[in-house]
Amino acid sequence: MKKVVLASNNAGKLREFAALLDAAGIELIAQGALNVPEAEEPYPTFVENALTKARHAARLTGLPALADDSGLCVRILNGAPGVYSARYAQLAGGEKSDAANNTHLVSALQGASDRRAYYYCVLALVRHPEDPEPLIAEGRWHGEMLDAPRGEHGFGYDPYFFLPALGASAAELEPAVKNASSHRAMALRQLLARLSEDA
């Protein structure tokens, strides 16, 4: 498996995955480069959405496809924004943007003493559209939510996601450091281990 289509148009995810997969000799092609429209994500679980996106991209390209569904889960908010992380503010009547999502989350956490949260990622890799044994991997990256942004790197909620063990927000980490420790890195290492078992 030398070429895999990434079922996402998110430039940040493409950078992270490409850096991680390049070391395994896998060329990642963004679905947008192959004119694949984004799939619907109608499900309430990360794994169902990831599988739907992977099958959609594989069906339209004829290539193996990798999809992730990931999001930020805040304990005191019962796991929100969760699968709705990318459109958290939009669902509350705001715009769909990282800035709006972060503003909405900071507002929802106002006065909260429990700031624990984690990024969660599920990866689904299908060899073909009807693959009956998709490879599924997951990762959790634990941290705490900040009230004010810190750092210039990353995307999404990264400036507000603080990692006590590293003494920095995810947006303060150099990309290579983030790529080595993030929820996506954890899930991808698990996925690559399963791929090597399949080889």
Image (tube, rainbow, N blue to C red):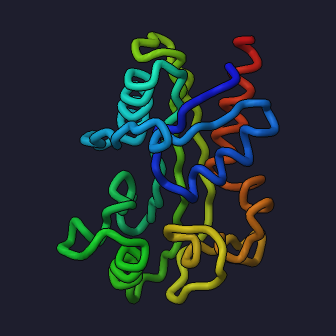
Q: Residue at x 68, y 45 (%)?
A: 18
Labels in figure, total:
0
Q: Nearer the viewer, residue 69 or 74?
A: 69
Picture residue at 38% right of the left edge, 60% below the top: 86
Quadrant the C terminus occupies? top right
Do we see residue 191 in this rendering? yes
31 vs 66, nearest the viewer: 31
Indicate whether 67 appears above or below 182: above
The answer to whether residue 80 is visible is no
Vertical relation: 120 (above or below) 55: below
Which corner quadrant of the image does residue 138 belong to? top right
- Look at 78% across and 30% down and name the residue there: 25
- Provide residue 163's location: percent of width, then percent of height: 68, 70
Q: Is residue 120 above or below residue 92?
A: above
The percent position of residue 62, horizontal first and vertical second, equals 47, 18
Judge left or right: residue 103 versus residue 145: left
- Residue at the spot x=41%, y=42% of the render? 46
The N terminus, quarter of image: top right
Between residue 100 and residue 194, name the one nearer to us.
100
Residue 33: x %, y % from top left: 50, 42
In this image, 182 relative to 112: left or right?
right
**Is 135 placed left or right of 93 in the picture?**
right
Along the line of sight, the residue nearer the viewer: 196 or 23: 23
- Residue 172 drawn at (x, y percent): 71, 77
